[in-house]
Amino acid sequence: MFLGGTETTSTTIEWAMAELVKNPKIMKKAQDEVRKVVGTKLIVHKIGIHQMEYLKCIIKETLRLYPSIPMYIPRVSYTCTKVNTYDIHANTTVLINPWKIQRNFKVWDNTDDFNISERFSNN
């Protein structure tokens, strides 16, 4: 159980770092924010983390592009239902693919781009 939790966290951090290396302007802005909030302190307190809005946007965008799990927990439909043009019968196991949802071109512009400034700056 502990390994699963640490693996998803470390993988997400690796994806974030890969995107920051590919986007030096975003990395510089994140570094500036951390330096502004943390300063010369050796320990970051909870209140300091809440002040790092740009860093939160980086995490959200990383999780949008690289969800930490490939599929959400399977669900079972209890009744017959219709989703768009699909008929889902009772007792059907339904899997939800977050990767596809989070790259839906109807919801997101430039779905494959690591875009911090517009996507999450107001959330």
Image (spheres, rainbow, N blue to C red):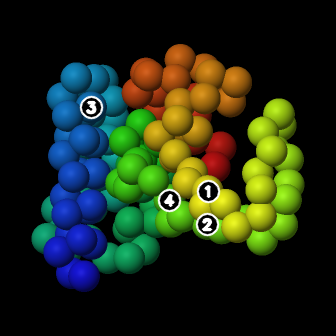
Compared to 25, does 9 lie above or below? Answer: below
Give the Cα distance between marks 3 and 2.
33 Å
Q: CA distance from mark 4 to mark 3?
A: 24 Å
Could you tell me which quadrant the N terminus lies in?
bottom left
Mark sitting earlier along the chain (1/4): 4
Q: Residue at x 45, y 53 (%)?
A: 71
Q: Amino acid at mark 1?
A: Val
Task: Tell me which residue sits at (33%, 30%) in the image.
Answer: 26
Rendering quarter of residue 7: bottom left
The location of residue 100, given as percent across then percent down, is: 52, 35
Q: CA distance from mark 1 to mark 4?
A: 10 Å
Whole-percent x, y for residue 103 in the image: 53, 30
Relative to the observer, which residue lies in front, 2 or 116? 2
Task: Give me the C-alpha separation between circle 2 and circle 1.
Answer: 5 Å
Q: Cβ–Cβ below 8 Å for labels 2 and 4?
A: yes
Place of residue 109 in the rendered image (x, y in percent of width and height, measured from the top left): 60, 20
Instruction: Tell me: 121 left or right of 91.
Output: left
Q: What is the crowding at mark 2: few (fewer than 14 residues within 10 Å), some, or many (at least 20)?
A: few
Q: Which residue is mark 3?
A: 19
Q: Report the mark closest to the observer, 3 or 1.
A: 1
Residue 33 badge = none
Q: Is residue 79 visible?
A: yes
Residue at which label 4 appears = 72
19 to the left or right of 114: left
The amino acid sitting under disc 4 is Tyr
Q: Which residue is mark 2?
A: 75
